[in-house]
Image (tube, helix red, strand yellow):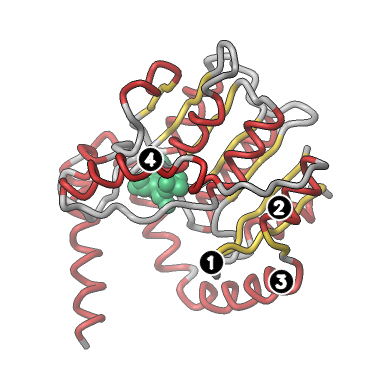
Amino acid sequence: MRSFAKKILIKIKIIIFFLKNPKYFTGLPPLIIDFIFRKGKRERERMKSLKICKKKSIKTNKALQLILQKEITIKFRKKYKKEILESEKIIKKTGIKLGGSGELDLLYWIVKIKKIRNVLETGVASGWSSLAILLAQKDIKDSLLISIDMPYTWIKDSYKYVGLAVPLWLRKKWILIREMDKKGLPIAFNKKVSFGLVHYDSDKSYYGKNWALHLIYSKLKKNSIMIIDDVGDNLTFHEFVKKKKLNHLIVSYKNKFVGVIMI
Ligand SMILES: C[S@@+](CC[C@H](N)C(=O)[O-])C[C@H]1O[C@@H](n2cnc3c(N)ncnc32)[C@H](O)[C@@H]1O
């Protein structure tokens, strides 16, 4: 009963957020459609997706070896222990928790070893994935990370805490577009930057993700990489790679699954 009340409270907070922030209003209809028309399907599709993920997934080390043709023995969190501790301190002081980070080793080592100059990501929250990408790019000349983020709808003033994990000295090579994907992705692609890697970690709904994956794929050149978080949530990723016949991997990480597409 308590968790039911909590769910209702979150939904009320989400509606209030959209009413108070009309710039993000177009994000509300897909959520309502997803909630009403996919209610029954959602759990069934999640179970199906998890089954595929469990069967096909490999560990990060193995994935990195396949992608980079190189064995990676150093962990990102160990290599940058000091920087991570600093960021954790800053975030802790705010007393606000915006949700955890994704698979940082995958992001860091792919960008670092492949020397990817331009990266695009959707979904920043505290900024852990942004931190990993920017640290990997720090010695790459003229590198750039463009991130898109709409703040958490159910946390009051959460925009104030977005990207706090990224220290000031790394922000010179970072553009943060504070929009939802629907607006932010076209803005990013209009900058005429050729992205070597796109990390998708924002809208997890079936429709939102499906729309974004198709758009991102249409804008990428051969040899670029897409990393998609939480592919176990629904069937979007599996349907997408099947339809486009894409070379892909599923990586398991702390009971979650990350999809990697090699274009
Ligand atoms: C899982 S968190 C990102 C975590 C981050 N990538 C990391 O690994 O540290 C998801 C973020 O995406 C944002 N978001 C959700 N839906 C979005 C949308 N439609 N457009 C843009 N951002 C969105 C959320 O508010 C949140 O800040």
> Residue under circle 4?
82
Front-most of residues 89 and 159: 89
- Residue contact at pointers 4 and 2, CB within 8 angstroms: no
What amino acid is found at the position of numbered circle 1 in the picture?
Answer: Lys
- The answer to which quarter of the image holds residue 258 is bottom right
In the image, residue 24 sits, relative to residue 255, either above or below, namely above
Dot 3: what SS? helix
The residue that mark 3 highlights is 52
The earlier-in-sequence mark between 2 and 1 is 2
In the image, is residue 138 above or below residue 94? above
Cβ atoms under marks 4 and 1 closer than 8 Å: no
Viewer-proximal residue among 53 and 203:
53
Label 1 belongs to which residue?
A: 254
Which amino acid, mark 2? Phe
Q: Which residue is mark 2?
A: 240
- Residue 4 location, x and y as percent? 25, 81
The residue lying at 16 percent from left, 46 percent from top is 94
Which of the two marks, 2 or 3, is nearer to us in this view?
A: 3
